[in-house]
Image (cartoon, rainbow, N blue to C red):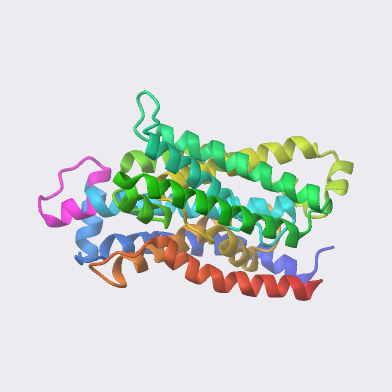
C-alpha cells in the first residue's frame, strides 16, 4: 500500500504538468517579445497567430523580427532544451548515476568534434544543407559514449560514478584540445567556430527547427517508450533481468537514441552544457523518481530553463550577445558541485 506522500505526489501530477505546460508557453511568448528591440505582447501574439493560420501579417519591423528571427530561435531553443534534458534523465536512470549527462560524460564534446570536422571539410549530404553536420555529430556522439563506458568498465568493473565522470572529464579535455587544434588551422572559420563551440542559436531557421522536432519525435519517442525499463534499471541490472528486461538490448537502444538526439542538438547549436545534468534533478523534485512521470517533466523543465538562459544571453549585455553555453555553464557548475556533494554524503 502506498504511503500518503507518494499518493499526494501522484494526485498532483496532472496539475504539475499543467503548470509546466503553462510556464513553457508563457516563457516562449516572453522570449519572443523581449530582445534588443522590444515588441508588445499584443503584436507578438497577433503576428504568430496570423502566421499559423496563413493569414496576412501587417508589414513592418515587428513582422520581420518575430517571424524571421525570434520565432525560429524560440522553437529551436525549446526543442533543444527539451531534448537535452530528456537525454540527461534517461542517462541518469540507465546508468544509475546522478551526474550522468552529455556534457559531463563527453558525449556533447564528441558530437561537437564530429560537427566541426564536417564544417571544416565541407562534408554534406545530397539535398540537405545540415545533413552532413548532423550525421557526423550523431556518429561521433555514439562513438564517444561507447568509448567512455568501455574505458570506465576496463578500469572499474563496477562502473562507479567517480570513474565514469573522471574519464568523461578527461575525454572532454582531450576532445576540446583537438577542436582547438582544428580551429587553429582552419583560419577561415576561426571566429564562427569559436562562437559556435560555446553554444549559440544565432541565425537558426525553421528548417533546423523541423529537424529538431523530427529528432525529438523519433528518438525522444523511443526513450519515452522505455520508461518502464528505466524504472527497472533503477533497482539494478540483475533485478531488471530477473523481471524479463532484455538488458543489453534496452541499453543499446537507449544509448543510440540518446547519442542521436544529442548529436542533432549539437549540430544545430554547438555545445550547450549542463542542461541534461541539472533539469532532471529539478523535475525529479516535482514528480518523483518514476520515469513515466519524470521523463515528460524533464522535457518541460529543460525547455523552460534553456529559453531563460537564451533570453539572458541575448539581453544581459545587449546589443552584445553572449554564448548560451556561458550562461548554462555558470548555473550548471554550481549545481554540479551541489549534486556531487550530496551524492558523496549519501554514500
Answer above or below: position of 76 versus 313: above
Query: Is 240 left or right of 219, judged from the image as shown?
Result: right
In the rendered image, the quadrant that contains the C terminus is bottom right
- How many numbered markers are drawn? 0
Asked if the magenta segment contains residue 254, the reply would be: no
Residue occupying the point 81% across, 53% down: 156
Residue occupying the point 44% across, 39% down: 117
Q: Position of residue 66 (x, y in %)?
A: 23, 54
Query: Is 216 left or right of 131, judged from the image as shown?
Result: right
Q: Nearer the viewer, residue 62 or 316?
A: 316
Q: Position of residue 120 (x, y in %)?
A: 38, 39
Q: Nearer the viewer, residue 190 or 112?
A: 190
Q: For the view shown, which residue lies furthest in the left direction? A: 59
- Residue 299 visible? The answer is yes
Q: Nearer the viewer, residue 8 or 235?
A: 235
Answer above or below: position of 317 versus 290: below
Residue occupying the point 64% across, 68% down: 285
Asked if the magenta segment contains residue 55, the reply would be: yes
Q: For the view shown, which residue lies furthest in the top direction? A: 126
Quadrant hosting residue 277: bottom right
In the rendered image, the quadrant that contains the N terminus is bottom right
Q: Position of residue 105 (x, y in %)?
A: 63, 54
- Residue 22 visible? The answer is no
Q: Nearer the viewer, residue 230 or 88?
A: 88
Quadrant hosting residue 166: bottom right
Residue occupying the point 64% across, 55% down: 168
In the image, the segment drawn in magenta is 51-67
Amino acid at each position: 500500500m502506498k504511503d500518503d506522500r507518494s499518493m499526494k505526489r501522484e494526485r498532483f501530477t496532472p496539475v504539475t504538468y499543467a503548470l509546466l505546460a503553462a510556464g513553457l508557453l508563457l516563457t516562449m511568448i516572453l522570449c519572443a517579445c523581449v530582445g534588443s528591440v522590444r515588441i508588445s505582447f499584443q503584436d507578438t501574439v497577433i503576428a504568430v497567430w496570423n502566421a499559423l493560420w496563413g493569414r496576412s501579417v501587417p508589414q513592418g519591423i515587428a513582422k520581420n523580427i518575430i517571424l524571421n528571427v525570434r520565432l525560429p530561435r524560440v522553437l529551436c531553443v525549446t526543442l533543444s532544451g527539451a531534448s537535452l534534458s530528456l537525454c540527461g534523465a534517461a542517462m541518469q536512470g540507465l546508468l544509475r548515476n546522478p551526474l550522468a549527462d552529455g556534457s559531463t560524460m563527453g558525449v556533447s564534446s564528441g558530437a561537437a568534434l564530429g560537427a566541426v570536422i564536417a564544417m571544416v571539410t565541407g562534408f554534406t549530404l545530397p539535398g540537405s544543407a545540415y545533413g552532413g553536420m548532423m550525421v557526423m555529430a550523431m556518429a561521433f556522439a555514439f562513438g564517444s559514449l561507447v568509448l567512455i563506458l568501455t574505458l570506465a568498465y576496463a578500469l572499474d568493473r563496477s562502473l562507479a560514478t567517480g570513474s565514469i565522470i573522471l574519464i568523461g572529464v578527461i575525454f572532454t579535455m582531450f576532445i576540446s584540445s583537438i577542436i582547438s587544434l582544428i580551429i587553429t588551422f582552419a583560419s577561415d572559420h576561426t571566429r564562427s567556430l569559436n562562437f559556435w563551440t560555446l553554444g549559440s542559436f544565432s541565425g537558426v531557421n525553421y528548417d533546423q527547427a523541423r529537424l529538431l522536432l523530427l529528432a525529438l519525435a523519433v528518438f525522444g519517442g523511443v526513450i519515452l517508450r522505455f520508461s518502464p525499463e528505466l524504472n527497472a534499471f533503477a533497482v539494478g541490472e540483475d533485478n531488471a533481468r530477473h523481471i524479463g528486461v532484455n538488458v543489453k538490448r534496452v541499453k543499446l537502444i537507449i544509448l543510440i537514441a540518446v547519442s542521436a538526439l544529442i548529436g542533432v542538438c549539437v549540430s544545430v547549436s554547438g555545445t550547450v552544457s549542463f542542461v541534461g545534468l541539472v533539469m532532471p534533478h529539478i523535475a525529479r523534485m516535482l514528480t518523483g523518481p518514476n520515469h513515466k512521470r519524470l521523463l515528460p517533466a524533464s522535457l518541460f523543465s529543460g525547455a523552460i530553463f534553456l529559453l531563460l538562459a537564451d533570453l539572458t544571453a541575448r539581453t544581459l549585455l545587449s546589443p552584445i550577445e553572449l554564448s548560451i553555453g556561458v550562461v548554462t555553464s555558470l548555473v550548471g557548475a554550481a549545481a554540479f558541485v551541489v549534486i556531487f556533494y550530496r551524492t558523496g554524503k549519501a554514500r
